[in-house]
Every structure is written in structure tokens, then in C-alpha cells.
Image (cartoon, rainbow, N blue to C red):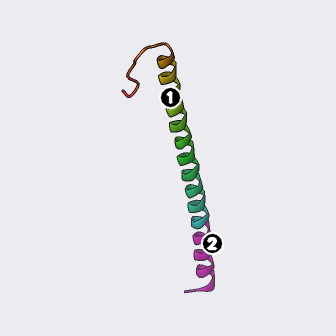
Amino acid sequence: MSVSSIAGAAVSLTKASLNLDIAIETFKMQADAERSIVGLIDASMQAVKQANASNGQLVDTTA
């Protein structure tokens, strides 16, 4: 194996590693965003339940 092919392989591995790091960070950001959306939905459901309770209504919000 020549020095140039080893150097080329090292560059390719470095690029692949960087791409993998970017993909992992993107996945983490997406997971955080999804958790935030779930939190917003839960807060909305709680607000509906409280509003219904204050109006004396019983509405199933679990569906």
C-alpha cells in the first residue's frame, strides 16, 4: 500500500467521520424538537381539561 493511498484513505475516513457527527447532531436536534412538540400537545390537552372543568363540562380528551 502506497503512502498516497493511505493518505487518501485517511482523508476519506475523516470525511466519513465528520458526516457521521453531523448526522448524529441532526438526529439529536430532531429528537429534541419532537419532545418539545409532545410537551406542547400535553400542555394543550391539560389546558382543554382545565377549561372544560371550569365550564362544568366533561369532555374525553384522551382520544
29 lies left or right of 38: right
Circle 2/circle 1 CB separation < 8 Å: no
Amino acid residing under circle 1? Gln
**The quadrant where residue 18 appears:** bottom right
Amino acid residing under circle 2? Val
Work out whether mark 2 precedes mark 1 in sequence or the reverse, and give the earlier one. 2
3D distance between C-alphas at marks 2 and 1: 53 Å
Find residue 35 and report its horizontal and vertical position in percent: 53, 43
The residue located at (36%, 27%) in the rendering is 63
Find residue 31 and report its horizontal and vertical position in percent: 53, 47
- Considering the whole magenta stretch, tell me its main secondary structure: helix
**The quadrant where residue 4 appears:** bottom right
Q: Which residues are magenta?
A: 1-15
Q: Nearer the viewer, residue 24 or 6?
A: 24
Q: Nearer the viewer, residue 34 or 27?
A: 34
| Label 1, residues with CA under 10 Å away: few <14, some 14-19, many ≥20 | few
Question: Does residue 43 lie above or below 2 as drawn?
Answer: above
Is 37 inside the magenta-drawn segment?
no
Is 11 inside the magenta-drawn segment?
yes
Q: Secondary structure at mark 2?
A: helix
Q: Nearer the viewer, residue 19 or 12?
A: 19
Q: Quadrant of the N terminus?
A: bottom right
Find residue 41 and report its horizontal and vertical position in percent: 50, 32
Q: Nearer the viewer, residue 58 or 63?
A: 58
Disc 2 target residue: 11
Disc 1 target residue: 46
The residue located at (50%, 37%) in the rendering is 38
